[in-house]
């Protein structure tokens, strides 16, 4: 064997050993739930889906096929997690996740998440959830022509739970205006009553084409009522229905 052949043989041998070690490390990092230390569940809700991330000391992974997760008895998709390959900047921990999208319509105000294998059950219960959001009326063709100080009422279709909070932010396109100083962006106090949102066009808003972003929803946010065998983290976002309406603002 020539020296070059010997060198190539050594390279192949070392590479094979490295791949073997990587495989062993990957196997060692997957473990049952009960063997994970300092477990944390982080829940994220976006649009029409929920995702839970499972964090623990040392970034352990799930043993594929051994862990099941549900939301109110409905199956969630389980991703066992992975570790970065080290190539092209892929480093760090890709923790296990549990997802459900296209949420069912009948979840109700209490959400129960269960994550379990043959060794342990993690449970998180969220109360005060609003499964439905109000639907504001469709914008009129061509928008509304209004003057500063005019009242404005926008109706909505109420779900099972009546909303109790609304907000309105006005934006003007920034055209030059004569007369007193005015604002290109302003807020208005909006109230909810009898199936509609009532507000008044701000007297400080500039003249010209504008639009208002109107939202109606709930003041009380969902909250964690129970957390078993882990520390639970949940930062809920406001649950509301929103729409944008075009306006033409006069004096």
Image (cartoon, helix red, strand yellow):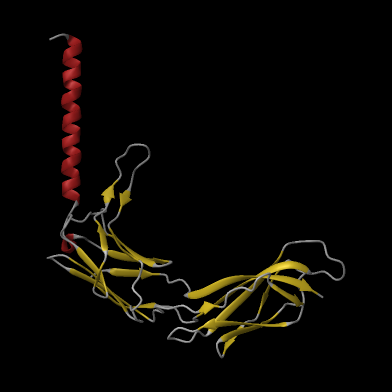
Quadrant location of residue 16?
A: top left
Looking at the picture, tell me which residue is in the foreground, 137 or 38: 137
Residue name at image x 37 percent, y 66 percent: 49
Q: Is residue 31 above or below residue 203?
A: above
Farthest-out residue, front: 141
173 or 229: nearer the eye?
Answer: 173
- Quarter placement of the C terminus: bottom right
The reply, left or right, for residue 103 in relation to residue 217 is: left
In which quadrant of the rendered view does residue 168 lie? bottom right
Percent x, y of residue 124: 28, 73
Query: At which x and y percent is residue 135?
Result: 51, 77
Location of the N terminus by quadrant is top left
Residue at the right extreme? 179
- Give the total number of marks visible in the rendering: 0
Q: Position of residue 107 (x, y in %)?
A: 33, 78
Which of the two residues, 101 or 26, is positioned nearer the viewer here?
101
Residue 37, compared with residue 86, is above or below; it is: below
Left or right: 142 as drawn, with respect to 166: right
Q: Report the side of 110 relative to 197 (left or right).
A: left
Which residue is at a point 42% across and 70% down the rendered structure image? 235
Vertical placement of residue 101 versus 203, above or below: above
Q: Measured along the vertical axis of the image, is residue 239 above or below residue 96?
A: below
């Amino acid at each position: 064997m020539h020296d070059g052949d010997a060198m190539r043989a050594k390279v192949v041998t070392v590479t094979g050993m490295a791949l073997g070690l990587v495989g062993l490390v990957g196997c060692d990092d997957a473990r049952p739930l009960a063997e994970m230390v300092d477990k944390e569940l982080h829940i994220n809700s976006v649009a029409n889906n929920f995702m839970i991330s499972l964090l623990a000391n040392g970034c352990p992974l799930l043993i594929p096929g051994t862990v099941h997760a549900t939301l109110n008895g409905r199956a969630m998709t389980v991703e066992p997690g992975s570790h970065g390959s080290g190539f092209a900047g892929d480093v760090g921990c890709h923790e296990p996740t549990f997802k459900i999208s296209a949420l069912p319509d009948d979840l109700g105000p209490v959400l129960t998440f269960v994550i379990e294998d043959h060794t342990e059950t993690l449970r998180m219960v969220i109360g005060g959830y609003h499964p439905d959001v109000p639907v504001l009326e469709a914008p009129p063709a061509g928008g509304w022509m209004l003057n500063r100080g005019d009242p404005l009422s926008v109706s909505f279709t109420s779900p099972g739970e009546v909303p109790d909070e609304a907000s309105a932010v006005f934006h003007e396109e920034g055209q030059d205006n004569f007369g007193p100083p005015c604002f290109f962006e302003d807020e208005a106090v909006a109230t909810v009553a009898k199936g509609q949102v009532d507000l008044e066009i701000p007297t400080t808003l500039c003249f010209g084409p504008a639009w208002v972003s109107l939202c109606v929803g709930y003041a009380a946010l969902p909250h964690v009522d129970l957390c078993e065998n882990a520390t639970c983290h949940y930062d809920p976002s406001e649950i509301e229905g929103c729409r944008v309406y075009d306006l033409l603002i006069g004096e």
